Amino acid sequence: MEFLLNAELMKRCDRDTIEKIGIPSLVLMERAALGVAEELTAGGFDLSSVLVLCGSGNNGGDGFAVARILEERGVRVTAAFVGREESMTAETAAQRRICENCGIKISSNFMNHEYTVIVDAMFGVGLSRPVEGRYAELVDWVNQQGCAVVAVDIPSGVSADSGRVLGAAVRADLTVTFAYRKIGQILYPGAQYCGRVVCRDIGIRIGRSYSGLPSMFTYGEEDLERAPKRRPYSNKGTYGKVLLIAGSQGMSGAAVLAATAAYRSGCGLVRVFTPECNRTVLQTALPEAIVTAWDPRQPSLEELERALQWSDVAGFGSGCGTGPAARRLLDYVLRHYRKPLVIDADGLNLLAEGPELLYETEAPVILTPHVGEMMRLTDGTKEEVLEDILRSARQFAREYKVICALKDARTVVSDGVRTFVNTSGNHGMAAGGSGDVLAGVICGLLAQGMTPFDAAAFGVYLHGLAGDRARREYGAYGMLAGEIARAVGEVLKEADRRRT
């Protein structure tokens, strides 16, 4: 697990390290600058002519220190102060003075030369207002130079809290950040502006300088060990029973994909509650599944109740349609089910007609909307949802007391307090059926005993890893959702191998 920080928490950790631990600010600045210089010299950059743009804040102080360290190593460096004298921090003023004492001239005529690398140390993570005027012109100039760009901590103009571009932003090839990655470096569009992100340790530690733990985090490959463990003495009942209320006329594939993914994620039994028209397709495509078929003209609530009682977890929505029968089934499940429930796809579209029904349910509910479904659930616009995707997921989860897995290029999972941001997966997964696979994976993990929040977060991560594996085999253009479902088992095989 890797914690992700916003600007406020990073500043607090920085301040506590200085004031409570006693490490001077200039020492932290020197460590940060040394980290940037080392990445520059080891990163294959052409360092024949380097420009370092320094702002008024401590990010600019990092920049002056970078210029000095590079100059000491024989690099031809131009340092430029682009901030305001009256806004300069004491640490930045000290670093500029040290540069001048070392014979480094601070240039004011830097735009008339060509450079092989530009180091952006103008703003840093503290930026909270749009980049305008001469700063926007400077950002535009940097982006037009055609040379490598390295950002100190975060590209100038990118919000550290949301990844939004604040007016204008530097496009970096490499971003060297410190202590912890920032959420704005992970979310889009900030991730595109950061390029490759390297995190350097400069002596700031959560836990010794900050009393709590961050609420935002992501997973890495080491977190595959979170997969439910298999027991030598076990049977199919040990790993749980999943009920999927899925499929409708012409949409049997969605049910097949969700059921396959549930099995591939390790659950013991899968039952699909589906219209009679899907029986043959399901039993042919996935003979391991139990099929309970119902008359689409009049679904039997008695049969549904028996299926719900049989299950350990239920999933609702994959290809189920939005007709009166599906609406009746969803209403019954929300009012009568008490076990974990995953609602996806058409289930979300039905729920959008009356999301207040979530207030009445006693089931632990996980919702997996994409942006369009989230718009319908909240009666909002695309821009409102995406302006701050973290806030969108957190607010909805908090208001309705659910877990919201808001799907996007960086899927966000929140219970209103904790927030997981996913970094696995790729654009090849933008294909029909991928969401059905995710719903099945989460159901399968829930059946094996994972808590709802952990199942949602790990399920999203596992789903993305499966997509990455499928891309390696089939390519981003040709991969199908069914191949993602099959790859789930391959990824978990790797987790099993690590344990043995």
Image (tube, rainbow, N blue to C red):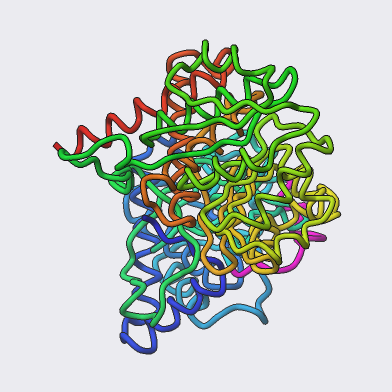
Number of numbered tags placed on the structure image = 0
Q: Position of residue 20 (x, y in %)?
A: 35, 89
Q: Position of residue 215 (x, y in %)?
A: 49, 67
Residue 273, image quadrant: top right
Q: Position of residue 436 (x, y in %)?
A: 60, 32
Q: Identify which residue is drawn at 58% across, 41% down.
A: 315
In the rendered image, is residue 209 in sight? yes
Q: As drawn, is 474 to the left or to the right of 489?
A: right
**Nearest the camera: 437 or 174?**
437
Q: As drawn, is 343 to the left or to the right of 371?
A: left
Q: Identify which residue is drawn at 78% across, 55% down.
A: 167
Image quadrant where one finds the N terminus: bottom left
Q: Identify which residue is drawn at 36% across, 58% down.
A: 69
Q: Is residue 133 magenta?
A: yes
Q: Position of residue 90 (x, y in %)?
A: 51, 83
Image quadrant where one finds the C terminus: top left
In the rendered image, is residue 109 in sight? no
Residue 28, image quadrant: bottom left
Q: Is residue 342 magenta?
A: no
**Nearest the camera: 7 or 344?**
344
**Nearest the camera: 49 or 288?**
288
Q: As drawn, is 267 to the left or to the right of 293?
A: left
Q: Which residues are magenta?
A: 126-140
